[in-house]
Image (spheres, rainbow, N blue to C red):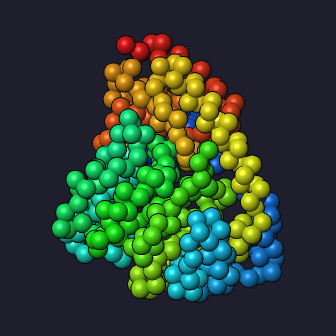
Amino acid sequence: MNYESVLSSCVQQMKPSGIRRFFDLAATMENVISLGVGEPDFSTPWSIRKEAIDVLERKKIVYTANAGMAQLRQEVANYLEKKIHVKYDSEHEIVITVGGSEAIDIAIRGVLNPGDEVLIVEPSFVCYAPIVQMAGGIPVPIPTKGENKFKLTAQELKEKITAKTKLLVLPFPNNPTGAIMTREDLEPIAEILRDTEIMILSDEIYSEMTYGKKHCSIAELPGMQERTILVNGFSKAFAMTGWRLGYLCAPAPVAKQLVKIHQYIIMSSPTISQYAAIVALKECEKEVEHMIKEYNLRRRYLVEAFNRIGMTCFSPEGAFYVFPSIQCTGMTSEDFCEKLLEEEHVAVVPGNAFGESGEGFVRVSYAYSLRHLMEAVSRITKFLEKYRK
């Protein structure tokens, strides 16, 4: 059978995730320090786990409403009003999804017609462009620059807008760079978009993880909530990656259409996870604060260490990644990562996995213990002594 003729040409042409490639390779080796995957090393807080156990014991494992449990949607609304001062109607504007990834998927598919252009701020998470392509859209990268701390500028946005532009993907706090956008950074972006029909997909999965500056959502700005699909979830802030629970918030006419996609491909999100997430939002603020303090210590250590050994690194203000330059070696990002893994058994992710503008950098996650980070820096230092130009 000719499987090439059977399979979708779009899927066949799609590149596998650059993140997973190095993670899977590292898994086949011994004595590897893997700093490649953005997964908290903290246990899910006990009160969340206990709720899941109690739900199992009470045998409450049944389907929920398609959009999610009413109590959870209300808690999400309460949480967002407290955190970003934006009010959402829990019944008509919030959809509970299988992780933030599903929220991104249905948001893009629900907005696009074939041939529509989607502006994607890069470097950024690997899923946006492939989802756009599968939906028949055209991904248009907007490269950001290290000298601007990888923030999107109004001029960069303006230069990419065309008559076909339908959606802007705004991924801040950013994976992989750790960049954030303050209110002052977002206002010029909002000013450009207010008089257009362009929607915004604001991926705020790292919103709790900022250092020194409070997260600002573009939905907070006047006139922007009505054109924003806000995506968030429980994986990062609450150390609930495997629980697979996220949500999106959108104007009621938009959410009404997006939930139809969710109905057909998912039906409803995991019931146990939904009960547990209610407890997360109501009871776990102190645990989150503790984790953020620990991440901040690791962040400061890595930034200082990389700059000391010659891998120039700006100080990220969000998420749990640093994005140091490897230009001192003269290698490409992929060559650097392959040689580092082969010779020193340290796994990091090449910057070009997050878009062409990430070439010349690597992503290093500090969602790992300080002991692991210190050993990794020791091995990277040894590696640089051999290859630094």
* Residue 114 in view of the camera: yes
Residue at 65% across / 32% down in the picture? 372
Q: Position of residue 128 (x, y in %)?
A: 37, 59
Report the front residue among 275 and 183.
183
Residue at 36% across / 58% down in the picture? 189
Please state, as top left, top right, bottom left or bottom right, where the N terminus lies in the image: bottom left
Report the front residue among 140 and 38.
140
Q: Position of residue 69 (x, y in %)?
A: 64, 82
- What is the total number of numbered labels drawn onto the structure image? 0
Classify 101 as above or below 180.
below
Q: Position of residue 134 (x, y in %)?
A: 30, 66
> In the picture provided, is 350 more to the left or to the right than 143?
right
> In the picture provided, is 317 more to the left or to the right than 240?
left
Quadrant of the image occupied by residue 49: bottom right
Residue at 56% across / 37% down in the picture? 34
> In the picture provided, is 149 more to the left or to the right than 33?
left
Q: Position of residue 348 (x, y in %)?
A: 49, 35
* Residue 8 in view of the camera: no
Classify 389 as above or below 370.
above
Please state, as top left, top right, bottom left or bottom right, where the C terminus lies in the image: top left
Classify 147 as above or below 246.
above
Classify 179 as above or below 191.
above
Residue at 55% across / 78% down in the picture? 88
Report the front residue among 196 and 321.
196
Report the front residue among 175 and 97.
175
